[in-house]
Image (spheres, rainbow, N blue to C red):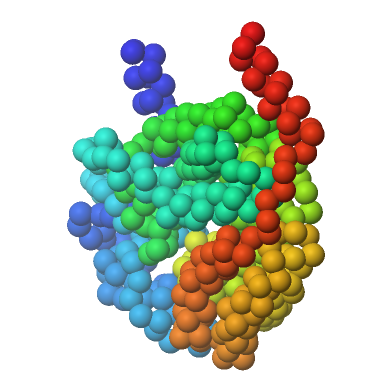
Amino acid sequence: NSLMHIFSKVSYRTFINVLRNTRCIKLSCQKPIQVSVLNVTWARSIGNLQQKYVYKEKGRIDEFEELNDAGKSAGPTELFIYPDSTNPVVVEKTLLPVDNKSDTPSDLNMQWQARKNTNWLSPDVWLKLSKFRLTGLVVMTSVAGYVMAPLPIEPLGLLACGFGTALVSGSANSFNQFLEIPYDSQMARTKNRVLVQYIISPLQAVSYAIVSGSLGLATLYYGVNGLCAGLGLFNLILYSFIYTPMKRLSSFNTWLGSIVGAIPPLMGWVGCTNSLDPGAFVLAAILYTWQFPHFNSLSWNLRGEYSKAGYRMMCVTEPDRCRRTTMNHSLYITGICALAPVFDVATLTFTITSIPVNLYLVYLSHKFKSNPDSKSSRSLFRYTLLHLPVLMSLLLLFRAPEKKPTQTKVDQIEAVVHNLDR
């Protein structure tokens, strides 16, 4: 117990130092801090992204105004303080200034007052850490892949596939939130996450991610098959440790994120068949192309926040390409749905019934490309939330007839039964 207490304390202090070094702590001061440098415009450079801020009230750092490219006010922003003369730090949490006679920003010393973990036992906290809505979508696509496979459904296998996928997804989302604490704190959309608010500690979040991921992979390996577990492990690493840091390096992160979204239906398919057939890649291709209109329309209205946090999203660094990519992949979905009967995934009826569903997606994408405002992007984003469930429902409704298990599958089942008898 003593060793665990020391480890937790050291980990907490190390984590705080990392946050301070990244200059992205989100805290709040209980009283205004007097400074001597007044009415100065500050700039922060993140790659080729520039952000400028100016003091709104002379003599205090109570409130700031963000300046747009024309030098005009873009409206009030959150509280900012500057611990040195060059780099700004976003602050907004429980922080108390230490008494210091010096009034220069470089001499401001801060002291943490940690928030008590009063609600960490609540299931809602861990559901939020797992991003339960996103996890639910991942499980839905994985189950759809299992059901769409051209073999009889095994209820226990389907249950293990869905449960294991949920645990692995929750683990990946937990690692993602842990790695992005300093940046989530700068965005209005993410500043209330449980780690940013310190409802749970980073050590608790990482421990949960490790346990959840291990149990999920074990469930997939022993309850489904090794190939399904391998895909789950690959997706966990890809999302947590490649896609997450890539968001701050290159707009290529959107393509990596689309691959992450395309793997769950593959996991469901191989969970049923224990093989990667061409039909599995039809489902994966639908999910891959759907990611672009979905995420590009979502991120379009958050360009300011992504820029502020230093994320190199396509909507920020390459807005024209963002709109073109959205339009192109909306067209691709229509073509991919036409291939479903060719690879015995669904009948021709699915292709016919999916045409109006996909054409309306193309229409909204065209409106977004032609007039990229908040209204067109929001309309497209909301429709993508409806589009995917409708498409999955049509696939399930008009799926291709089941095939009898191959001799290989029969041999595998007999081998399992034989081992159990022994």
Viewer-closest of 41 and 222? 222
Image location of residue 276, percent across then percent down: 76, 45
Instruction: Name above or below for residue 112 compared with residue 23.
Output: above
Q: Residue placed at 65% from the left, 32% from the top? A: 225
Residue at image point 52% right, 69% down: 390
Q: Which residue is at a point 21% across and 38% down the rendered structure image? A: 118
Q: Is residue 310 visible?
A: yes
Q: Position of 277 compared to 77: left or right?
A: right
**Looking at the image, which is closer to me, 111 or 100?**
111
View extreme (top): residue: 422
Q: What is the x, y in percent for residue 241?
A: 62, 43
In this rendering, the answer to whether 388 lies above or below 367 is above
Task: Please tell me which residue lies in front, 378 or 111.
Answer: 378
Quadrant of the snapshot with the C terminus: top right
Can residue 217 be seen? Answer: no
Q: Residue 298, how many percent across, how many down?
A: 51, 71
The image shows residue 77, relative to residue 178, as above or below, that is below
Q: Residue drawn at (68%, 63%), measured in percent from left and top?
A: 346
